[in-house]
Image: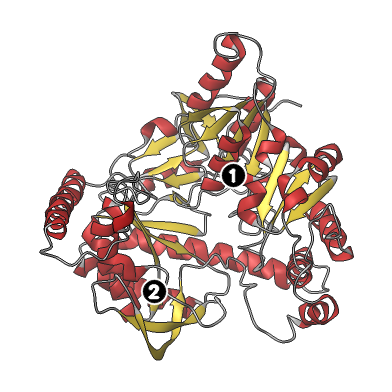
């Protein structure tokens, strides 16, 4: 079995077997001091109630060198092709200004478009593929071809059937078309129709919204909640309502774009801390308290920490116990985005708060989306009643955005009741447990094969590192030839040397499906030489030195 380098509560282990021996003996060494540690719910140190293991293995040096060389060669040929287009030696397919606008400031910035037209276009066929079925564990794709090297596509009229879906965020398998399961959704569709045609503050608040908000609050164990029709806007439109000028936002460097946009729109001062790095965060908090605002040195009106439950590109889980301890120590607020973690982790699917055995009261603002684990659309903000009442009045989404449509609200209610066991079955709990089994099985097999994968052992988001730009397109195309649909990601969505394929494991995946994918990956890993794992030291060692903190009462 492979011995990937791992991070366990802040410490790097070069040999997984050695770690297992320490676990079995109940002894764990931390900062030179031997501590007792047990698995399965017994306190690990002072903050963690379970073993916390994440993998961020460094690629061999030659991989990094060839990756940079690949981008350099691509850039050189890109400038050569731009030269040929300028002189009419190659057809110009890109958007350009009309002749009458040549004296205008360019609407399409030439340099900014360089990467798109010269690199992205070469592998564009791997994205935006039209799906013509429910995005369940398998789906159907509309076949398309290109006659001009991906500048345009035409559909052949044929359908690629039963493609194994390893890219959709269908964590609990609620993206389904079963008639019996969707019976209540059909009833609400016939009763309310498809749209609300108004905002929440005008005539867009329906009894289904009130029912859903009460159910979400009960599910999360908080006083109140408010739902929104769009997950992205839940962050981008509500953060500006909570903070503004004179406030300080401390944001994880790998936060989602919706969090970044919301922070920028707020007008607050933004400072970035290294991903999941408690030393970096504590330094920013300490400096904020000591020095206050720039120039005036007045105290900040508010300090709010923005983090995610599961980071969608890294597969890592937030170090919530340590962050809660820090926010209590420095009297800051905590905004937790559980878009990928709600439903996906925790014994009953209640997210990272339950995963770490913490209280919802430890988090000031709980945010999540219904677009992933619940097979629907929209998002929520939950917490104290005063917080939610404030947002009902001041949120841009409540004032300007159209309300969530009733059939979608009913789908969320159906899925959430299933998770809570209110439908009279244990199916929801079975889905959560099946997702955990599938996730651990898939990650363990990839480690054994020698791939470098990132993230936490319990995260259903599984990034597999490809590195070299030329392998992005080759990997996705070869997988589709084997009837497997995957998501590949490169620069600028990831660091330039860390292109990857991102797998999303679902409770709906059968063991046969996962084995089919794993066999294809094993074969393709050898063919494309993707098995880079050497069990070397983490490429981010600074992230994982544990801070000794105690949770405050």
How far across and how far down the image is residue 240, in percent?
66, 37
Secondary structure beneath dot 1 equals loop
The answer to which image quadrant residue 321 occupies is top right
Percent x, y of residue 368: 67, 52
In the foreground, 39 or 91: 91
Q: Residues within 10 Å of mark 2 (few under 14, many from 20)?
A: many
Q: Which residue is mark 1?
A: 50
Q: Residue at x 44, y 33 (%)?
A: 544
Q: Which quadrant of the figure has residue 361?
A: top right
| Quadrant (top left, top right, bottom left, bottom right) of the C terminus | top right
Judged by depth in the image, the label closer to the viewer, 1 or 2, is 2
Q: Is residue 252 above or below residue 521?
A: above
**Residue placed farthest to the right in the image?**
207
Q: Is residue 129 left or right of residue 350?
A: left
Q: Image height check: is 457 above or below 389? A: below
Residue found 75% across the figure and 67% down from its top: 405
Q: Residue beneath label 2, please?
A: 517
- Looking at the picture, how far across and down is residue 263, in whole percent? 58, 36
């Amino acid at each position: 079995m492979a011995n990937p380098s791992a991070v366990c509560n802040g410490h790097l282990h070069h040999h997984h077997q050695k770690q297992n021996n320490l676990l079995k003996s109940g002894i764990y060494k931390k900062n030179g001091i031997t501590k007792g540690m047990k698995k399965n719910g017994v306190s690990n140190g002072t903050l963690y109630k379970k073993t916390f293991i994440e993998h961020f293995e460094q690629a061999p040096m030659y991989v990094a060198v060839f990756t940079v060389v690949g981008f350099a060669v691509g850039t050189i040929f890109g400038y050569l092709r731009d030269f040929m287009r300028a002189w009419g030696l190659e057809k110009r397919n890109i958007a350009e200004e009309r002749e009458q606008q040549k004296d205008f400031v360019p609407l399409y910035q030439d340099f900014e478009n360089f990467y798109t037209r010269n690199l992205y276009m070469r592998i564009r066929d791997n994205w935006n593929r039209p799906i013509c079925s429910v995005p369940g564990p398998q789906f159907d794709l509309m076949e398309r071809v290109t006659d001009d090297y991906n500048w345009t596509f035409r559909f052949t009229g044929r359908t690629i059937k039963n493609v194994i879906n390893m890219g959709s965020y269908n964590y609990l398998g609620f993206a389904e078309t079963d008639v019996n399961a969707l019976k209540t959704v059909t009833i609400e569709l016939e009763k309310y129709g498809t749209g609300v045609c108004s905002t929440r503050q005008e005539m867009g608040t329906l009894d289904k919204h009130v029912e859903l908000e009460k159910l979400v609050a009960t599910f999360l164990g908080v006083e109140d909640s408010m739902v929104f029709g769009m997950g992205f806007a839940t962050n981008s439109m509500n953060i500006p309502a909570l903070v503004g000028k004179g406030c300080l936002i401390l944001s994880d460097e790998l936060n989602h774009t919706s969090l970044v946009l919301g922070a920028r729109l707020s007008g607050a001062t933004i400072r970035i801390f290294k991903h999941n790095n408690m030393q970096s965060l504590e330094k920013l908090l300490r400096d904020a308290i000591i020095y206050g605002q720039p120039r005036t040195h007045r105290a900040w009106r508010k300090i709010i920490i923005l983090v995610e439950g599961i980071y969608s590109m890294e597969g890592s889980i937030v170090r919530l116990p340590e962050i809660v301890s820090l926010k209590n120590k420095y009297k800051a607020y905590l905004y937790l985005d559980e878009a990928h973690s709600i439903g996906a982790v925790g014994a009953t699917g209640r997210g990272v708060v339950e995963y770490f055995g913490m209280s919802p009261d430890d988090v000031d603002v709980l945010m999540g989306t219904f677009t992933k684990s619940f097979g629907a659309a929209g998002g929520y903000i939950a917490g104290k009643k005063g917080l939610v009442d404030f947002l009902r009045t001041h949120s841009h989404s409540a004032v300007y955005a159209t309300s969530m449509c009733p059939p979608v609200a009913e789908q969320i209610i159906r899925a959430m009741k299933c998770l809570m066991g209110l439908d009279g079955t244990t199916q929801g709990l079975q889905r959560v447990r099946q997702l955990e089994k599938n996730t651990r099985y898939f990650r363990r097999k990839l480690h054994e094969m020698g791939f470098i994968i990132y993230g936490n052992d319990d995260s259903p988001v599984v990034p597999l590192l490809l590195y070299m730009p030329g392998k992005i397109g080759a990997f996705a195309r070869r997988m589709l030839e084997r009837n497997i649909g995957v998501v590949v990601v490169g620069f600028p969505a990831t660091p330039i040397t860390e292109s990857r394929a991102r797998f999303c494991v679902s409770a709906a995946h059968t063991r046969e499906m996962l084995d089919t994918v794993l066999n294809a990956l094993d074969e393709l890993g050898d063919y494309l030489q993707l098995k880079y794992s050497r069990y070397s030291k983490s490429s981010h060692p600074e992230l994982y030195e544990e801070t000794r903190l105690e949770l405050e009462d």
